[in-house]
Image: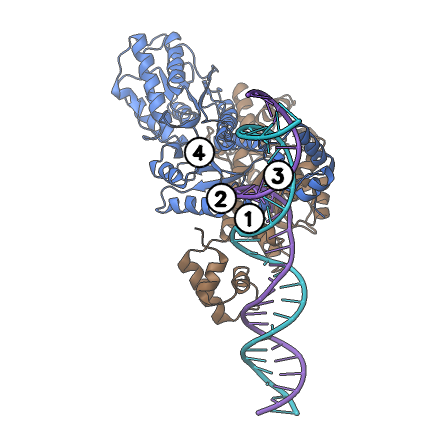
Chain colours: A blue, B brown, C cyan, D purple
Amino acid sequence: MRVRLEDVARATGVSPKTVSRVLNEEPSVKESTRKRVLAAMEQMNYRPSPAARGLAGSRSFLVAMLYDNNDNPASTYLAEIQDGVLEACNANRYSMMVCPLRTRVQDFIRRVDALIADHHIDGVIVTPPLTDNVALLRRLNEHGVPHASISPLRRDETIGVRMDEQQAAKAMVGELVRLGHRRIAHILGIADHGASRWRLAGYKDALAEAGLPFDPDYVVQGQFTFGSGVLAARELFSRPILPTAIFAANDDMAAGVMWAANERGLKVPRDLSVCGFDDTPLATQLWPPLTTVRQPSREMGKLATEQLMEVLRGRGEGLLLQVPFTLQMRESTGAPPSDAT
Amino acid sequence: MRVRLEDVARATGVSPKTVSRVLNEEPSVKESTRKRVLAAMEQMNYRPSPAARGLAGSRSFLVAMLYDNNDNPASTYLAEIQDGVLEACNANRYSMMVCPLRTRVQDFIRRVDALIADHHIDGVIVTPPLTDNVALLRRLNEHGVPHASISPLRRDETIGVRMDEQQAAKAMVGELVRLGHRRIAHILGIADHGASRWRLAGYKDALAEAGLPFDPDYVVQGQFTFGSGVLAARELFSRPILPTAIFAANDDMAAGVMWAANERGLKVPRDLSVCGFDDTPLATQLWPPLTTVRQPSREMGKLATEQLMEVLRGRGEGLLLQVPFTLQMRESTGAPPSDAT
DNA sequence: GGCAGAAATGACAGCGCTGTCAAATTGCAG
DNA sequence: CTGCAATTTGACAGCGCTGTCATTTCTGCC
């Protein structure tokens, strides 16, 4: 039948417990013994039973990735993160479960309780916007389940990975300034998402640095969706003096802006420059292709998971890493119209 | 501590084994006993330990969703399916694992072996294009692991869910004919994908029904990607007589066609009608919004999983269901230019 | 060389459930 | 009522691993 730990023990001439120690990378095993055991495991193609390990021990070698099923960020974003998380899990011999949460439903916390109780989840990866859900985070702490966050709003007491979105937004808008734009509008994301705050802050920073005034009329609320981008752009187009560039807080809204521009007969980038944030596949599927900020989502999923692993393996506290951003200058941005004041 | 099966047994005054029987919905339990046990479970908030069940029994209550990580169909498509699968799993008290496979890598089959051996996977959901990977299917059969497919190429000996893509494609192209088009081109998907074959077949059917000739020059190879759509469209635009409508085998390629049309100064739909297949979010993020065929991916994931559950629960053989399609007529299609011959 | 203390290993029970098979209970014909 | 089969329930071992604690082996040092 199946090769068991006991079989490996017999083959190596040690006790099952010692093989177990090797398996769990416990330190108190003589190097020579470890080598022999590992060789036998390899040779016999031994594969530990997760069920037995979970039952006997306290660990399940299971990680859950939580995501919000209401305010769904672009699914491509989540899919990429999931890919990265999975990669890191596999590398560490962990398994992953995905767990969509409907935060709008009253007892979504119950789902978390059930998940943890049922499966003895060892650790959790939290994706935006759940990263800022205090009820969720409190619950995870109560359960004593370590978690790593991707782009969390708060930077203290949190491990995981982030990108300096404020700097990125500042750089993006700075680029617009460099192209000659003076009237730059911004479309906000959903109010309480960290992404929205940072991107707005970066926008303001860039204006300040360029000595441009901050005009509240040029900042319109959006919801991160294509449709909200269309509406926001229409609103901006109703201003007495039109902006020459619009920085949308994400790509979907930027796509909406381009639609609205088309609608109004504005040619991008000749009459209006448009840029977004995230660099989703959509960015290169628009015409013209969208200038945006590239965010390495896959990599971020992987890094956050690796930090979680540090904790799970008891190797340390885990860090909040920071990954670099890249500006993707494409054809949706250009110099402002020459007749612009 | 944790409420165990034994605790429920004691509270009900029956043996643990009887509680176990109730838990597993075994038939040989008197109705009155079952009710009492279920009540106690509910009242004590009993949650069975998957680890213990997996260890003692032969079942793991785990389902794996396999997908191809090379020829990745649009990630939104997979995300939707995943959502549906997850929903059905939860409803049946099963858990789900996701498992990306790199079929191009020599030993991807090993990953499947490992998955099944490690986790004692009870059943598998196979997504396109893995549904047609004979090596994979053979392996699953060797392992004796039941599987349900989503849009499989073969219709025999397979359970899961499909859509009549050929009929859908025929209807779509038929719609173009009705609008007055006579020169309708088609952009193929990746050669060995079922989706490509069916959509081509439907295209041919519609031409035949309309009494239009099939012109091989109007059928160009694509790869399901945006870029390949651009290239294919350029090729079509090099024909001595241009088509008045292009039916691309999926939305991404249709988006590419629209880009290429723009490039060439063709106005959609005035000069050229464009339509796709799948109704991904992209379809409504284009300008003009894309006419396409809606495929209920989420629903399909759910239905396929439910069929798998039928088998896992020993309630039957499972069926290959068929779901209806819907034509989404949007603004990328219209009457052909009046000067068209 | 002998001894304390550290390092390495092992014995054993038990995690929470289910499979097997035996026992008790029920239903029903005679 | 009895007897026999069908139905319902229970006793018990054991799935494959790890925690606890005892035991053995190895150090360095007087």
Label 1 with label 3: CB-CB less than 8 Å: no
The amino acid type found where label 3 is placed reads: Ser
Q: Which residue is mark 3?
A: A20
Helix or strand or loop: what does disc 1 sit on?
helix
**Residue B201 visible in the picture:** no
The amino acid type found where label 1 is placed reads: Ala
Residue B152, which numbered label?
A: none
Rounded to the nearest angstrom, the CA distance separating label 1 from label 4 is 22 Å
Q: Which residue is mark 1?
A: B51
- Nearest the eye: B177 or A34: A34
Q: Position of residue A274 (x, y in %)?
A: 40, 19
Q: Residues within 10 Å of mark 4 (few under 14, many from 20)?
A: many
Q: Position of residue A244 (x, y in %)?
A: 35, 15
Label 4 with label 2: CB-CB less than 8 Å: no
Which sits earlier in the primary sequence, circle 4 or circle 3?
3
Label 1 with label 2: CB-CB less than 8 Å: yes
**Subunit bearing disc 3:** A
